[in-house]
Amino acid sequence: MVDALTEARRILVDGGLLVDARPDSRVAARVRSGSGRSRVIGTIGTQRDTKTDDQLSDRAVREVLRRGLFRSRRRGRMWHAIPFEDRSELQDYLSDHLRFSRRVSWRVPAAKRGGELVVERAVRFEILARR
């Protein structure tokens, strides 16, 4: 990824911006019932291989900053919401997903897991300015 960031820098004008955004595997995804800001009823972890890839990406960004190729203008985390009609639809999604683990760690009994569900997944971002 260092090579990709170096190539991206090559085509940017001085002071040009590059937005690096990717799922944040350091934070478990949250499962909420319904829409809005209801309480968290479960969490979903990240598969081991994906965590390793994310760590390598984090190192690559740190490396290009260390080399002085970019300057960090801003960084943070935002949440991306993914709605599901019910638990069955969520499970189908998880069965095919390459990032999330296949199971939800529920915080509530089965009787309280019905209806619409929303998965909120963390996305890390950093705005990099070409030096």
Image (tube, rainbow, N blue to C red):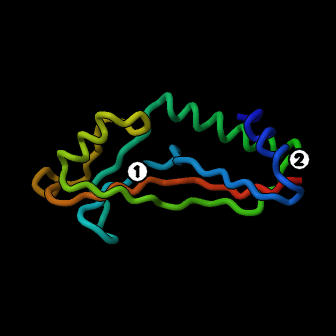
Q: Furthest residue to the left?
A: 111
- Quadrant of the frame with the N terminus: top right
Q: CA distance from mark 2 to mark 1?
A: 33 Å
Question: Disc number at residue 68?
Answer: 2
User: Above or below — where is 48 with respect to 44?
Assistant: above
Give the mark nearer the N terminus: 2 vs 1. Answer: 1
Identify residue for label 1.
29
Residue 87 image position (x, y, % from top left): 19, 49
Estimate how packed mark 1 is, as few (under 14), some (14 to 19) or many (20 or more) residues with alpha carbons within 10 Å.
many
Q: Percent position (x, y) of residue 50?
A: 50, 33
Give, as a three-letter code, the residue at label 2. Answer: Gly
Identify the residue shown where x is 30% and y is 58%.
83
**Residue 6 image point, x, y percent:** 81, 39
Identify the residue shown where x is 75% and y is 35%.
Answer: 2
Q: Is residue 47 left or right of residue 75?
A: left
Q: Residue at x 77, y 62 (%)?
A: 73
Quick one: SS at disc 2?
loop
Residue type, mark 1 in image: Ala
Question: Where is residue 8 drawn, in percent x and y?
Answer: 77, 44
Task: Name the foreground residue: 88 vs 46.
Answer: 88
Relative horizontal placement of residue 13, taking residue 55 as reference (left or right): right
Residue 107 to residue 4: above or below: below
